């Protein structure tokens, strides 16, 4: 039985953005507050995310790119692809996101389960960011575990509605990695980098079809025999999501989470959660969907 669950958060996750920027910057604090107000997480379970150092980030990224992000010399082309203007706060936020992912992975190894209330930045590549992603926190944390021989067979279960092209471009050839992405086939990114297992779903896919495909995917993950799982728990398959194009309900997403979490718990595989995408209008719908994942965590792990 899991006795403790650390969940990492930082006020730095909330980034001040120009009024016209479409990214829902407020969702991180809204989620933290919702989890506490509804007794889904206790205050003592929320830990401060440290700032990852450039050396740690460079486990998965080009040092020149990391330095350019630090000092603000990154190209306007890359910033346009990311979707955020550069600022010192953007760099600090990105370092905190990676720091939370690494600490969550370490906590999951110790306790069996942990989470990060940000992250899942699966569109950032070795030498550039894209799609609201600056540094690829899961790629860094996976390399951190692998290089320190803390895990030898690492699976990424990426259920964000957008294919995890950055995960695949960085980690796809690493020994001991298995990347499973289930996503909208016609959604961003329009040029996908193949994962070890990709399941592309047609627009409008609903709960039943989605869950059938997930069962197939998890069988392939089981065949890989992982000793650690990163779960990218994006809630943008929700039918109200403005960037999703799928048709999942709250119940469908909770059933999805239950499948993944029961898979890990029944096999005693440590699991680290990353937040992933959520762009519903109003954003409170995405916040509720994220919180529901942690409701399922409580039920499955009996904590």
Image (cartoon, rainbow, N blue to C red):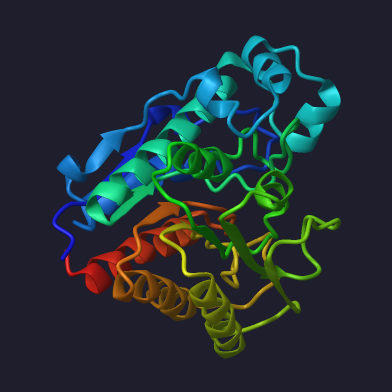
Which residue is at the front of the view, 180 or 212? 180
Q: Image check: 67 left or right of 89?
A: right
Quadrant where the C terminus sits is bottom left
- Where is 263 relative to 189, above or below? below
Quadrant where the N terminus sits is bottom left
Kindly identify the residue that appears in the image at 53 percent across and 45 percent down: 138
Kindly identify the residue that appears in the image at 36 percent across and 31 percent down: 49
Kindly identify the residue that appears in the image at 34 percent across and 40 percent down: 8
Q: Which of the 4 image quadrants contains residue 299?
A: bottom left
Q: Position of residue 164 (x, y in %)?
A: 67, 55
Q: Image check: 293 left or right of 18?
A: left
- Where is 255 relative to 131, above or below? below
Kindly identify the residue that appears in the image at 44 percent across and 64 percent down: 289
Which residue is at the front of the view, 301 or 220? 220
Q: Image check: 297 left or right of 27?
A: left
Q: Position of residue 32 (x, y in %)?
A: 33, 45
Q: Which of the 4 image quadrants contains residue 182?
A: bottom right
- Where is 282 relative to 6, above or below? below
**Extreme residue in the top direction:** 71
Q: Position of residue 65 (x, y in %)?
A: 72, 22
For residue 16, say whether it is visible.
no
Q: Position of residue 271 (x, y in %)?
A: 37, 58
Q: Image check: 285 left or right of 271?
A: right
What is the tally of numbered marks visible in this picture? 0
Q: Which of the 4 image quadrants contains residue 261?
A: bottom left
- Where is 211 relative to 85, above or below? below
For residue 274, say whether it is visible.
yes
Which residue is at the front of the view, 52 or 81? 52
């Amino acid at each position: 039985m899991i006795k403790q669950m650390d969940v990492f958060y930082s006020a730095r996750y909330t980034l001040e953005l120009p009024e016209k920027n479409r990214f829902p910057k407020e969702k991180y604090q809204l989620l933290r507050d919702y989890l506490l107000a509804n007794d889904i997480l206790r205050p003592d379970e929320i830990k401060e995310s440290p700032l990852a150092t450039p050396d740690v980030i460079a486990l998965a990224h080009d040092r020149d790119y990391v330095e350019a992000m630090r000092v603000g010399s990154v190209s306007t082309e890359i910033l346009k692809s990311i979707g955020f203007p550069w600022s010192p706060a953007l760099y600090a936020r990105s370092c905190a996101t990676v720091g939370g992912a690494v600490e969550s992975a370490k906590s999951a190894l110790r306790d069996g389960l942990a989470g990060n209330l940000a992250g899942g930045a699966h569109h950032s590549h070795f030498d550039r960011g894209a799609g609201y992603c600056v540094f690829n926190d899961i790629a860094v944390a996976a390399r951190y575990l692998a290089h320190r021989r803390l895990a030898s067979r690492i699976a990424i279960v990426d259920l964000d509605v957008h294919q995890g092209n950055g995960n695949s471009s960085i980690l796809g050839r690493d020994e001991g990695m298995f990347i499973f992405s289930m996503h909208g086939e016609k959604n961003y990114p329009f040029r996908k980098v193949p994962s070890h297992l990709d399941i592309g779903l047609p627009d409008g896919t609903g709960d039943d079809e989605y869950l059938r495909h997930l069962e197939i995917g998890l069988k392939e993950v089981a065949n890989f025999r992982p000793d650690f799982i990163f779960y990218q728990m994006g809630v943008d398959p929700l039918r109200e999501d403005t960037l999703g194009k799928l048709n999942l309900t709250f119940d469908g997403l909770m059933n999805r989470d239950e499948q993944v979490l029961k898979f890990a718990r029944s096999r005693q595989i440590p699991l680290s959660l990353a937040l992933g995408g959520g762009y519903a209008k109003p954003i409170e719908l995405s916040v509720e969907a994220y919180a529901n994942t942690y409701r399922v965590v409580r039920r499955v792990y009996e904590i």
